Amino acid sequence: MIELKTNSDLSVLLEKVEEKYPFEILHSKDCDNLAQDILQVTGERVSGSTIKRLFGFIKSKSNPNNYTLNVLAKYIGNEDYQCFLKKYQLAETVKNNNTISGFIEYAKANSLTNPKKWVTHTSGLRFIADFIASDASVTAIIAEGGMGKTILLAQFLENYQQSCFALCGSPLKRKDLSLCEHLTALKDKYDLIIIDEIEETAYNFLEIRTIFFELAKFLSQHNNVKIIISIRPYTWVRLSDVFSSNLQNKWFGVNFNTFKSEQCVNLDTIRLDKLNADNELFISTPFLSPFYLELLEKNQQKTFTNDWAILNQFFTEKVWKTAYAYEKKLFFDKIMELTNNGKEGGRITRKDIQDIISKYKKAHVDLVSYNILKEEKELNKYGAYSSFYSFGNAAFLEFYILSRLLTKYDGFNNALLKEIANEYEDERKLNLLKLAVSYALHQYDKAVVQVFDLALNEFERQSLMVHIGYQIRLDKKLQEEVFPQFVKTENGRKFFIERWINEEHLNGFYGKGLEQYLQIVTEPQDVIFANALLYYNAFLNKNTAECEKRAAIIKNIETKSNSIHPFVMGRKYMTLLLEEHRINKKYSKTIKEEIEQLLTCGLTERDEDLPVHFAGFEFNILHAEFLTNTYVFTEQLLKKLIKSKRQLLHPKDADEVLLKFFESAYYKVLVGEIKLEGIHPWYRYTVKNYLNRVCL
């Protein structure tokens, strides 16, 4: 007869069975269905009645027999129950190893990201170092799940020279010792005690509260001690009232005076744009960064992963492929129902969902402890606290809204886009559109171009242009299959091709797109725009034949009687200056007079047709003079632009950096530090090229 090591062994086995089974076990009938699935997977039979006893639908005091345990272990991928126990015990051995090296290995084994890719959390390490140097006895690392609390502690311990004991998992719930007694036994042997993964050790908040009471009891009895705990904001605001004002004085760097989760977080987020400048991404929340890094690590071709893919992965791993997934969905659907599918805000009162909180306690605890849902407390007019529920991050709510809309409209299409544009407003509308196009791009759906058929304002169009541009430039399949669709449609050309100027890929897909664009457009402005970009690329690559071809086309286009956008007019004269200097090593008197006249008449930028820069014409003249090292207009333009009000298409535009280059070259001064991560990837080609020219 196999004896259960502890009741927790059977609990873990049943939990793994629940995770394996694709449906929720909510009723006794579900046990019969599970029995059928076990038979199909293992070829061995366990009766529905036995499963009902195991899951508590039939009361029983007897333990399952050898056969049942072995079949259940096989169902979840083990050879038998003994193999399952060894695997489980091995995990516990690593987890409960009280040495520093053991804790570090545990952190690496359970990290969502490759430990070799860990980014040093400088501010977090500084926070711990300040605590160690202080007179305080205890501190808490407070941040959401997945934000790197355990990794931070492991990074700190790699260089910690003193003795340390790490408590995580079952040692917090020893039956032979209370936590207070356990800590008392450890305090004289170790300089530092770490208590990690408190939420993972407990079934509900009652058990976590007991841990907090034990910690409070210990702190009231002892002074010469250093303790670090890691905890999630929701747990902290619910339970920090356990500590009296006297005990609060022993804490370092925590907030006891808030009932809002976001106000007690003290672990700064490592932003993705600091990780790798060549793999930037608009992620709706840095909370998802571990999933992004994991996906990037798995993909050796470094295919770009967008925010839809990351959110989908997050919900798959943290909701849909976990126990009680159906019950968790009930919480989401209730919030959707009460907020009109997210159109009327995303927050409801606890009273509104008290019935499902009471009925589905485990699902509720899982959701709030991982901050997929969060509870906030606010003082009402009667001086009492009112509780409100919402998704833990707006990105989660928007992902779920879009998931429902995709089901409603059977995928991405014009009807889905129209509902978003007509029914939602402001930031939510734009975020849903971004998420929708990310979904479409993830599916390589050419219909993504329809987003520019919507009646959007200039900011919304520019934001979507940037969002789409990031993803296309890093995915070859998108470049080959989806990008040409923007060339073929009128609004795709107007609001994407003519705005998203990717100079890095003029030799590649973007240059090919401009060639296709020129086969469609006939307006002088459009013809100049594309030919000028292709000339610029030919000039940098010293392609004489291509330079002559493009310059001849532009020179023969009449612009005096046409209303040409200043940016395009600037591109025209940039081309002519470059070509004249290439051939004659100087500018002609005629071209200089035409430019002077245009500068005098005061060209003004307009919002239509092309992106708005604060001085499109002037900037292109500066480009030409910088590239030819021939300065006729530079001094007067620099003086004008330095005094002018700067208007950028986007905060990551390169205009400000380029202005530094032009000043450096003309005034013969050092350019100073240039941070490429602060610039759009599609401008970095030009910036790197110009930086090399300044440094020569």
Image (spheres, grey):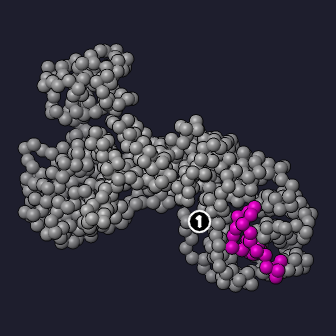
Residue 184 among those drawn in magenta: no
368 shown above or below 629: above
The picture places residue 300, in percent across and down from the top left corner, at 52, 43
- Residue at the location (67% across, 81% down)? 644
Residue 344 seen by the camera: yes
467 shown above or below 400: below
Residue 475 seen by the camera: no
Amino acid, disc 1 = Lys
Would residue 389 be found to the left or right of residue 53 on screen? right
Report crowding for label 1: few under 14, some 14 to 19, many 20 or more residues within 10 A (C-alpha). some
- Residue at the location (7% across, 63% down)? 221
- Residue at the location (70% across, 67% down)? 612
The boundaries of the magenta stretch are: 598-625
Quadrant placement of the C terminus: bottom right
The picture places residue 60, in percent across and down from the top left corner, at 15, 24
674 shown above or below 638: above
- When asked about the image quadrant of residue 357, the answer is top left
- Residue at the location (42% across, 42% down)? 333
- When asked about the image quadrant of residue 359, the answer is top left
The picture places residue 596, in percent across and down from the top left corner, at 84, 80
Quadrant placement of the N terminus: top left
* Residue at mark 1: 652
The picture places residue 446, in percent across and down from the top left corner, at 67, 42
- When asked about the image quadrant of residue 109, the answer is top left
Tell me the SS state at disc 1: loop
Would residue 539 be found to the left or right of residue 255 on screen? right
Residue 614 among those drawn in magenta: yes
Say how many tags the image has: 1
